[in-house]
Structure formats: C-alpha cells, structure tokens
Amino acid sequence: MVINGYFVMFFLSWALLRIGFVSLITRVAHSTWAENQRIYKIPLPEQQYEREKFWAVPFIVDGVGFALMAYWGVLQFVEWGILPTLSLTAASFGMLTLTHIFFTEPLYYGYHLLLHRVPSLRRHHIKHHKATVPTPPSGYTFTLFERMSYLVLFAFTVLIVGWVGLLTPLGFFAYFLVFDFLNSIGHCNVEFFPRWYVHSPLKWVMYSPSFHSLHHSRWEANYSLFMPMYDWIFGTVEPESDALFSQAQSGHGPNNLNRLTLQGSQQIWSKPLVPKGILTRT
C-alpha cells in the first residue's frame, strides 16, 4: 500500500478529532456545572495557563508519528483498504483490551517510576508535574523527549494487535479516543465518580480523577496509567486516595495541598507537603 491522500487524511482527521474531544472535556471540567465537585478548590496560576496553551500541538506530532508507525508496522500485515472503515470485531476489541492491560499498563508503570527516580529523566517529567492541580491539557503537556517516548510506548498496543492481524481502522480510532477520555478525566480536577466507587472492585481497574490528582500533588505515589491495580500490587498507592475521593465526591474538596487524613467526620491537616522541593522551581 502506498501513502496516498486517503492515508494522510485518515490520520489528520484522527488528530483533529482527538483535539476536539479533549477540548470538549476541558470545557466541561471548567464549567460552573463542575464547580461543586472540584477536587482541589484552588485557583490555577497564570503560569500554568501559559505553559499549557499549546497542548494541542503534540496531537499533530502524534498524527505524523502514528501514521508512519502504522504504515511500516501495521499495514504490512493488515490491508486496511479492503476492510470496512467502521468494522470492529470482537477479536480485535478483546486483543486491544488484553494488550493494554497486560502489556501497556505495566510497561508504563515501570517507565513512570523511572521518570520519577532517574534524575536525567526526572528533569523532563518536571514540566508535566508543575501542574500540581492538573487540568485536561496538563495530560498533554510534556517536553518533546517525553512526548516522543510516550508515542513509542503507546504505539505498542496497536502495533501488537496489528502484527497478529486483528487491528481494524475503527479499533485504532476507538482505542485512542478511549485513551484520551481516560487521560483527560484523570487530569480534570473534578470528582464525578459515584460514591460507591471507592468501596467497589472498580477502583482496582479504573482510576478516579482524585486518584491521579494525588499523583500530581504528592509526586511519589499513584503511578499507574489508568489501572490502579499495579499501584496496589507494588505498594505505591497514596494512603490518602480514598479519603480525598470521599471528600471531593461530597463536594468538600480541600482548598490547599496540605496532607489530609480523616478520623470520623473530622478533618485533620498537617504541614504542607512539598515534593522534594522540585516542584517549586520555575
């Protein structure tokens, strides 16, 4: 298959669709409707808006990068031209899901630990973590090095499914739209999950917005991509995760980043936590 106009338009349309999708989630997260469920009720600094205003640019980089990877890594095995664009078989869906759970999630977890613990990598990751109170654009604000490393890492899911001959165009689209949705809600600073979530097994397999917000405010915990089970397995869950969820879900999110514990209905605050001093750098 040659790189023709259809192939280029496919990936440009995909990039623009992702930008629109994340923009919509961002508008909802900043709306008055979401105000009561704000996790951290803290005004965002102007520097954060400046830092994140070009958040959509990496999607174009993604479009080009994934197009090349798809051409060289997938289209040698899958003739998309003979597949209905809207096809998504049960086998394709199942393989995408299993590959993400048992390959992409643990691979990201390990890489994320390195981003926090290896000084040369941490210098890149600090840009993302300057958003101590994240917004959806925070989930796409990285250095070029970090963004390119994610491009390679997250491409493996669709490449593996393509290599075994089960990837379809709709499967490709659907996987990354779900990815963008989960990434955006994890950074939205709005706790809209139901009250029963924290007492159910669901908290093992899908993170809540407050779970990932604690990763930004505490730095050394809650490393998982979307599935907290790897934090539970390896003992890196932030102890405050359930407490912050309950407080934010009830509409009483904290107005600072101090340490939080709950004893009965009483909130007890201790001294502020500054993550190793690195997040105070400008």
Image (tube, rainbow, N blue to C red):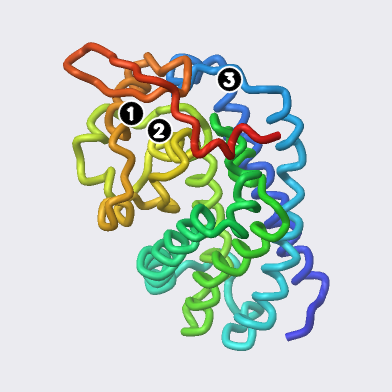
Residue 60 drawn at (x, y percent): 76, 56
Question: Label 3 belongs to which residue?
Answer: 31
Which image quadrant for residue 153?
bottom right
Residue flagged by tag 2: what amino acid is it? Ser
Look at the image and tell me in which quarter the N terminus lies: bottom right
- The answer to the question of whether label 2 and label 1 lie on touching residues, with beta carbons closer than 8 A, is yes
With 243 as the anchor, is 152 left or right in this view? Answer: right
Question: Label 1 belongs to which residue?
Answer: 245
The reply to whether residue 143 is visible in this rendering is yes
Residue 199 drawn at (x, y percent): 19, 35
> How busy is the neighbourhood of tag 3: few (under 14 within 10 Å), some, or many (20 plus)?
few
Please name the residue shown 42% across and 17% down the image: 254
Secondary element at image label 2: helix
Q: Nearer the viewer, residue 218 or 33?
A: 218
Look at the image and tell me in which quarter the C terminus lies: top right
With 184 as the anchor, is 80 left or right in this view? Answer: right
Q: Looking at the picture, does residue 62 appear above or below residue 71?
A: above
With 276 as the anchor, is 94 left or right in this view? Answer: left
| Identity of the residue furthest to the top in this view | 266
In the rendered structure, which disc, 2 or 1, sits on the residue that comes first in sequence? 2
Labels 3, 1: front one: 1
Q: Looking at the picture, does residue 261 appear above or below residue 102?
A: above
> How busy is the neighbourhood of tag 2: few (under 14 within 10 Å), some, or many (20 plus)?
many
Q: Nearer the viewer, residue 143 or 25?
A: 143
Q: What numbered label is drawn on residue 210?
A: 2
Please name the residue shown 23% across and 31% down the image: 196
Residue 250 drawn at (x, y percent): 32, 17
